[in-house]
């Protein structure tokens, strides 16, 4: 029986994925095997040694201390693409809000309350101030063609837009899903220059922080709108406000409000609703429940954000799964200890990701507790598990 601690309210849809005879979900567990989290801040949390993995029911992992957990041998999973359709729909909403001045119009309508029979005439007289362009025939620039970006690009095609996509690292899987009508640009400058609507769907890392800055905005049309449903830090807030004030940008729609942006002319702030749908929540929980199950039972790692992916099938013979530093001579130390006990290695997998690595060894018979202790005592080891068929 495995115990999973929940740090937020979690959709019970995990019951459709897991064999509930093998699992207990407990928000107050003191020694859980795994943690399932949505938005709870884990940076100051002290986790018991029992925790083998943390699963984030969503894509972003800013609330989780990835390196600190990696150095304790705790694998962190997320759910990339599970909320893609929800974010795609909100991005389309953002384009419409940037075009038709719907928010301003709705707010203006509220001022007509109590005008009685005059309302109809006032509406006809005042609606002209909220005129905005249609999406059809306009150019949509999509930066980042991952799970979400591909859906947004394809939706743009379906809306009759001319779509430019930019992603120098697009995967084969996502390339296959991309509409043939999407023009794949080889430079970000080309996308900036030609876009009537620019939407960014890339992860927030050091290389992408503030990528939409004053220099990028200076290359765009004054009539263009920028959409940000990925991460707030991708866009330079000050540069956006300056561009709007100078008439160098028409609108900015963001799912990441800040004190600087709220109420600023030309800015539409949405309270981080991109993935806030029951369908998205269910999809995320299903994905991470499956990943958690396969890791706890078989040591399989899929969609980890701090360790290399190491997908494994069902265990058919004794399996040692080791998380360790990615440094020389680790494999030699492991195989030497195994050989010293007279065991034969039937299969071995070694994967690395930056400073961290995992090694999986399948043996002809079960290793002794003494061998497992020696492996766990290696200076390079973070966690060593024995998984039996």
Image: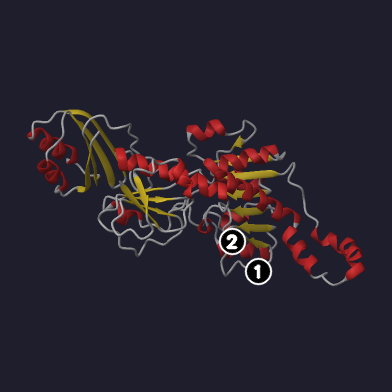
The answer for how far apart the CA atoms under marks 2 and 1 are is 13 Å
**Residue 320, quarter of the rendered image:** top left
Q: Is residue 342 left or right of residue 39?
A: left
Dot 2 or dot 1: first in sequence order is 1
Q: Nearer the viewer, residue 299 or 127?
A: 299
Q: Mark 2 and 1 residues: CB-CB less than 8 Å, in contact?
A: no
Q: Work out which residue is located at the far bottom of the displayed protein and give it.
A: 114
Query: For the C terminus, which image quadrant?
Result: top left
Looking at the rendered structure, the secondary structure element under dot 1 is loop
Residue at 45 percent of width and 50 percent of height = 57
* Mark 2 Cα shell of 10 Å, populated few (<14), some (14-19), many (≥20): few
Looking at the rendered structure, the secondary structure element under dot 2 is loop
Compared to residue 142, the image places residue 312 above or below, namely above
Relative image position of residue 164 (x, y in whole percent): 62, 40
Q: Is residue 141 left or right of residue 112?
A: left
Relative image position of residue 247 (x, y in whole percent): 70, 61
Relative image position of residue 162 (x, y in whole percent): 69, 39
Residue at 47 percent of width and 39 percent of height = 169
Residue at 69 percent of width and 37 percent of height = 158
Q: How many marks?
A: 2
Task: Look at mark 1 in the image and give the residue it sits on.
Answer: 263
Q: Work out which residue is located at the far front of the displayed protein and give it.
A: 21
- Residue 201 visible: no
Relative image position of residue 137 (x, y in whole percent): 74, 41
* Mark 1 Cα shell of 10 Å, populated few (<14), some (14-19), many (≥20): few
* Between marks 2 and 1 in the image, the one whose residue lies nearer the viewer: 2
Q: Nearer the viewer, residue 292 or 155?
A: 292
Q: Is residue 345 left or right of residue 21?
A: left
Task: Look at mark 2 in the image and give the residue it sits on.
Answer: 271
Residue at 73 percent of width and 53 percent of height = 99
């Amino acid at each position: 029986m495995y115990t999973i601690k929940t740090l937020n309210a979690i959709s019970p849809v995990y019951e459709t994925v897991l064999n509930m005879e093998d699992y207990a979900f407990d928000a107050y567990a003191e020694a859980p095997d795994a943690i399932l989290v949505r938005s709870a801040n884990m940076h100051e949390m002290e986790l018991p040694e029992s925790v083998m993995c943390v699963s984030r029911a969503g894509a972003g992992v800013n609330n989780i201390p990835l390196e600190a957990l990696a150095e304790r041998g705790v694998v962190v999973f997320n759910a990339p693409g599970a909320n893609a359709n929800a974010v795609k729909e909100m991005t389309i909403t953002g384009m419409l809000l940037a075009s038709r001045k719907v928010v301003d119009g709705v707010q203006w309508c509220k001022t007509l309350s109590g005008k009685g029979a005059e309302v109809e005439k006032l509406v006809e007289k005042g609606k002209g101030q909220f005129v905005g362009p249609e999406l059809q025939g306009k150019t949509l620039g999509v930066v980042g063609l991952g799970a979400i970006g591909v859906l947004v690009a394809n939706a743009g095609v379906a809306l009759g837009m001319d779509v430019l996509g930019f992603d120098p690292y697009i995967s084969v899987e996502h390339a296959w899903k991309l509409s043939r009508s999407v023009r794949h640009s080889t430079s970000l400058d080309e996308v900036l220059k030609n876009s009537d609507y620019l939407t960014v769907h890339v992860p927030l890392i050091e290389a992408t922080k503030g990528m939409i800055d004053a220099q990028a905005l200076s290359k765009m049309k004054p009539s263009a709108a920028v959409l940000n449903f990925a991460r707030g830090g991708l866009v330079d807030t000050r540069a956006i406000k300056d561009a709007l004030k100078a008439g160098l940008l028409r609108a900015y729609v963001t799912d990441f409000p800040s004190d600087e942006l709220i109420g600023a002319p030309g800015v539409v702030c949405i309270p981080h609703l991109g993935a806030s749908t029951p369908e998205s929540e269910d999809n995320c929980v299903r994905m991470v429940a499956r990943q958690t199950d396969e890791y706890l039972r078989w040591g399989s790692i899929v969609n980890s954000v701090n360790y290399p992916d190491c997908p494994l099938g069902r265990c058919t013979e004794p399996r040692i799964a080791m998380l360790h530093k990615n440094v020389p001579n680790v494999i030699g130390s492991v195989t030497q200890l195994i050989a010293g006990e007279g065991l034969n290695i039937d299969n071995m997998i070694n994967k690395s990701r930056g400073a961290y690595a995992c090694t999986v060894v399948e043996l002809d018979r079960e290793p002794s507790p003494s061998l497992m202790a020696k492996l766990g005592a290696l200076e390079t080891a973070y966690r060593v598990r024995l998984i039996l068929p």
